Image (cartoon, rainbow, N blue to C red):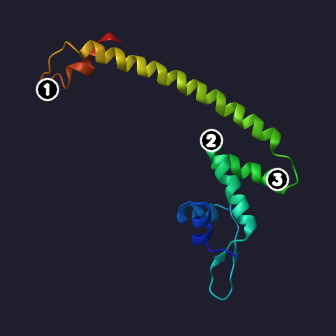
Amino acid sequence: MLTASVLARNLNVPVFTVRYYTRIGLLQPHKQTSNGYKIYQPSDATRLKFILSAKDLGFTLAEITQILEKAEHGESPCPSVRKIIVHHIEENKRKIRELQKLQKKMENALKDWENLNDSMPNGTSVCHLIESVAAEQ
């Protein structure tokens, strides 16, 4: 039997993580009647390890909840897990493409700014460096 702080320490996570997962129902400890403490079982540590592994793979807490619910109802969550991870991979690829475009734009702007002098705001211009990029669009 473990308290939230002991469970957190054993898995090297902040105690507020254990308490938050408990509050949203991902962990379901038993309550001691004598002192009202929430007591976690070794199975809760296993479940928390699963949650942390899923988070490390990019699954959201909502997705983890769905996966756990399927498992609790005797269904294999594996088909859903595959579908979710494929979606995340495609989304990551899209974000990487966007970041690469942004990186190139930033590098080009910096190169264009190398020979421009600094200037003071004058009421119509705040920073002519940024404004020069906007003028190109």
Instruction: Give residue 119's position: percent from left, percent from top.
Output: 13, 21
Depicted 68 relative to depicted 112: above or below: below
For this rendering, which residue is in front, 119 or 13?
13
Q: Which residue is most to the bottom?
A: 34
Other-residue count near label 2 (Cα within 10 Å), few / some / many at <14 / 14–19 / ≥20? some
Identify the mark at residue 121; answer none if there is no mark.
1
Examine the rendered structure and indicate whether residue 5 appears above or below residue 67: below
Q: Position of residue 89 (x, y in %)?
A: 65, 30
Disc 1 or disc 2, which is closer to the eye?
2
Question: Which quarter of the picture shows residue 134?
Answer: top left
Give the vertical position of 80 relative to 106 (above or below): below
Q: Which amino acid is tagged 3?
A: Ala
- Amino acid type, mark 2: Gly
Residue shown at 31%/16% (left/top)?
A: 109
Q: Is 28 placed above or below 93 here?
A: below
Mark 2 vs 3: CB contact within 8 A: no
Query: Image quadrant of residue 126?
Result: top left
Q: Quarter-wise, where is residue 135 in the image?
A: top left
Could you tell me residue 57's position as x and y percent? 65, 42
The residue that disc 3 covers is 71
Left or right of 73 on screen, residue 120: left
The outermost residue toward the right is: 74
| Label 3 Cα neighbours within 10 Å, binned few <14 / some 14-19 / many ≥20 | few
The N terminus, quarter of image: bottom right
Please report the residue visible at 61 percent of the width from the left and 65 percent of the height from the top. 10
Is tag 1's residue or tag 3's residue first in the polypeptide sequence? 3
Q: Earlier in the sequence, mark 2 or mark 3?
A: 2
Q: Which mark is residue 58?
A: 2
Mark 1 vs mark 3, CA separation in Å: 61 Å
Q: Mark 3: which secondary structure?
A: helix
